[in-house]
Amino acid sequence: MPDIDELARRYLASWNESDPAVRRALVDALWTDDARYADPIVSAEGRPAIEDVMATAQRRFPGLVYRLAAKVDAHHHAARLTWELAPPGGPAVIIGLAVLITERDRLHRVYGFLDPVPVPFPVSVSTAVPATALATDPHRNPSPGAER
């Protein structure tokens, strides 16, 4: 297991990096070639897709920063990291938990959990559909048995 505190610091730094070239270098150094990231909003396979998720977060939450919210807990090749997204020095807007799975001292899989989930709730990075639109437009409601 790599130095988990350093890994957590680098992970959050990559989410906070606004320069695309620097962020891409951070992602390339931190994640395995076949890395995957998933949270309730998006799923990404491969470093370019993961970097795109981070770039989208930068655009969606300008002026907010990711910061460590609790001590990182780890065993074997897994760690849990509690983080906050907040204005610098301000209260958290979103609190999250990331389960980091490492391989060869790099991130291999990350599973994220959010509390509260930001609204509107996008379906994917490329197609953001507000949850209210799904609830009020039966033609966009993907649930089984929805009238068309």
Image (cartoon, rainbow, N blue to C red):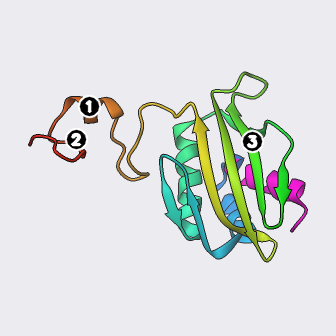
| Residue count near mark 2 (Cα–Cα under 10 Å), binned few <14, some 14–19, many ≥20 | some
Q: Is residue 4 magenta?
A: yes
Give percent across and percent down for residue 140.
20, 42
User: Pointer 2: what residue?
Assistant: 141
Secondary structure under tag 3 reads strand
Give percent across and percent down for residue 123.
38, 47
Give percent across and percent down for residue 12.
75, 49
Residue 111 visible in rendering: yes
User: Pointer 3: what residue?
Assistant: 82
Tell me which residue sits at (77%, 39%) in the image. 67
Indicate the amino acid at tag 1. Answer: Ala
Secondary structure under tag 2 reads loop
Q: CA distance from mark 2 to mark 1?
A: 7 Å
Tell me which residue sits at (76%, 50%) in the image. 80
| Residue count near mark 1 (Cα–Cα under 10 Å), binned few <14, some 14–19, many ≥20 | few
Image vertical order of residue 62 relative to residue 22, above or below: above
Q: Marks 2 and 1: CB-CB under 8 Å?
A: yes
Q: Earlier in the sequence, mark 2 or mark 3?
A: 3
Q: Quadrant of the C terminus?
A: top left
Task: Read off the magenta span.
Answer: 1-15
Q: Nearer the viewer, residue 94 or 147?
A: 147
Determine whether, in the image, residue 25 is placed left or right of residue 41.
right
Give percent across and percent down for residue 45.
52, 68
Q: CA distance from mark 3 to mark 1?
A: 31 Å
User: Pointer 1: what residue?
Assistant: 135
Indicate the amino acid at tag 3. Answer: Thr
Q: Marks 3 and 1: CB-CB under 8 Å?
A: no
Tell me which residue sits at (24%, 46%) in the image. 142
Indicate the amino acid at tag 2. Answer: Asn
Q: CA distance from mark 2 to mark 3?
A: 33 Å
